Image (tube, rainbow, N blue to C red):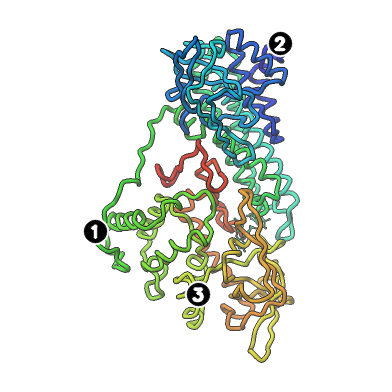
Amino acid sequence: MLAPESAGGLALDLAGAAEILRAAGEHVAPEPLLAVAGLAALLLTRLDSAPAAALLEELVAGRSLPALAWQESAGDLSDVPLDCGCEPGPAGAMLLQGEKLMVLPGRAASGWLVSARGDDDTVLLWVPRGTEGVTETLVPLVDGEQAATLRFDRVALPASAVLAQGPSARHALRHALSAGQILQAAELLGTGQAMLQQTLAYLRTRTQFGQPIGSFQALQHRAVDMFIHLEIARATLDEVLALASDRAGLTIERLEAEASRVNARCTAAALQASRSAVQLHGAIGYTQECDLSLFYKRTLRLSAWLGNVTAHQRRHAALAEGTARGNETVAWPGEFPRTADWREMPESEFRRMVRAFLQQRYPDHLRYLSHRARWSEMRDWYLTLSAQGWIAPAWPQAHGGMGLPADKMIAWIEELEQYGVARAPDQGIVMIGPLLIQHGTPEQQQRFLPRILAGDHVWCQGYSEPNAGSDLAGLRTEALQARDAEGDHFVVNGKKIWTTLAQDANHIFMLVRTDKEAKKQEGISFLLCDLRTPAITIRPIHTLAGEPEFCEVFFEKVRVPAENLVGRLHGGWTIAKALLGFERIFLGSPKQRSTRWASWSGWRGRGGCSRTRCSCSAIRPSGSTSPTCRPPTRASPTL
Ligand SMILES: Cc1cc2nc3c(=O)[nH]c(=O)nc-3n(C[C@H](O)[C@H](O)[C@H](O)COP(=O)(O)OP(=O)(O)OC[C@H]3O[C@@H](n4cnc5c(N)ncnc54)[C@H](O)[C@@H]3O)c2cc1C
């Protein structure tokens, strides 16, 4: 697209190429267009040397896929190589030493265009695949792509490997990177626009409450928000492309600033669109069964490559870096108090105590997890808090909680979040526990609350059904009253869906229909059920991150003792709403501002919390690291 006609290319200007990249984004095209036909071609067309021209011809002919290897440290937008250097070697050869990150395409590249530190300025080198001394480590990316981390260990290169050096090399590299960032913005705009279209189609077809959900104003507003962000991004792109086409008038510094402006704008708009799209699709949007997941992952990958929003905003606005906080060691003399008059304790002392406790007791490998933690991972930490008497910070002390007042509760949440403490399966602590304290019988409180505190009972929430999501009152799982020699009980038949971590739980609280004749809301009851009861089947569902975070739960004539009814028979709707109150307070808490998925069941019902914010653009498979994404919460807990 960008190569001159003399090299067999189309000689498109940046605006033409941007339109192709936008279309590629709209279709999540798998080809390494941006990496090769964008970045590598942009660089080679600007180099005035025979080896560069030859390589460009190979690229245009499709015989070579050169990959640009420029970045040396995560989040760094600088084109100046610090680590990678080359020096004269024996017999006129050059010796290359150093490391490069996030090189795309990974495995497919036929060689690398490497920027290195020469004697007194940047040198651009061509290193064909297979050259001795090059080690390639492939890093799987969230969209199925691979990036390479390259290690050059005294790699001997002939003089012909030098494509350019000095100011012209540096200038070409800066130009290629900026133009590449503009093209990337176009691709992100394409993914964002595609997600908006898919979402609009879904809003017109999915029915709840007997009508298409798109007829509700709240959803229309969110769709309009998506549209507005994308339109602003499109307008910015048009403006920057017009500026960039005026080659003579634009300095490289201005091009870099404009590239950062449009990149930050389009990335933010695409991320906003992707989060809204997932939310407006409800739970299905969160799964990999929905096509949206492909667009979402591509958006995440693009948003974290060639600099993320923050890096570009910083470069554009030339802001100073924020100061990191939270990693200094905090001293706490003596034992940590199990209980105290927390109201009287100064907040600074309370925070110091919590921070010191976390530093001493919270396992390092569980900080800033990139996935929803499982019970097997968090059990020990849960028991540590339980032994300390701190597992239920919001419960009254009379029921075994800490009884924190509101200000200390916020401090508690912020400290845990700042330290990167993962969320343990806690539906016992934040949902059913508080509910039983308010609505349970004394017997139910005695039976269940201590077991929640001790970690013996792990709970999950059985509300949603395939056709009863937002329209929860439409649920059909049925519980019939019965009596036998062992006493009064219910017989439950039906299916629940999207049940978070049901496979880790041993109890479920659920809504069931106990009167089919009554008005929808008046025929529902609230039951507690031991998941180890026979005839219950749990089938995990994989989220778009590929993790079995939620499940389907099937009930076939399952026996639930009558004493497990909470509230009055057919009075479950009141209880359900009370529980959603706890859930919404939890979802609206400051902790969720920097949690990847604040979405979790807060989508339910009119007026439910609709906030989803993601502080990290690079979702990655468990255990892997994304070089361009640092845990933002270390520097700023509420990014
Ligand atoms: C990660 C995750 C974990 C979950 N865990 C659980 C769990 O443990 N237990 C459980 O029972 N359920 C769980 N859910 C399910 C959740 O409660 C439902 O997703 C939710 O009730 C929405 O239902 P739905 O997915 O069918 O979306 P739909 O009802 O199809 O709604 C689609 C979108 O439209 C919006 N919407 C619909 N109607 C309206 C309206 N009238 N006004 C405004 N907005 C509206 C919704 O908010 C949503 O954004 C989970 C969901 C997710 C994503």
Residue 393, visible in the rendered structure: no
Residue beneath disc 2: 5
SS label for mark 2: helix
Give the quarter of the figure containing the C terminus. Answer: top left
Residue 489: percent from left, percent from top: 65, 84
Residue beneath disc 3: 436
Residue 461: percent from left, percent from top: 59, 66
* Residue 333: image tag: 1
The residue at 46%/43% (across/down) is 631
The residue at 41%/68% (across/down) is 386
Which-is-in-front pick, marks 1 and 3?
Answer: 1
Which-is-in-front pick, marks 2 and 3?
Answer: 2
Please tell me how crowded label 3 is: few (under 14), some (14-19), or many (20+) other residues with Cα within 10 Å. many
The residue at 40%/73% (across/down) is 400
SS label for mark 1: loop
Q: Is residue 229 above or below residue 315?
A: below
Q: What is the distance, in whole Å, between disc 2 and disc 3 at their CAs?
A: 74 Å
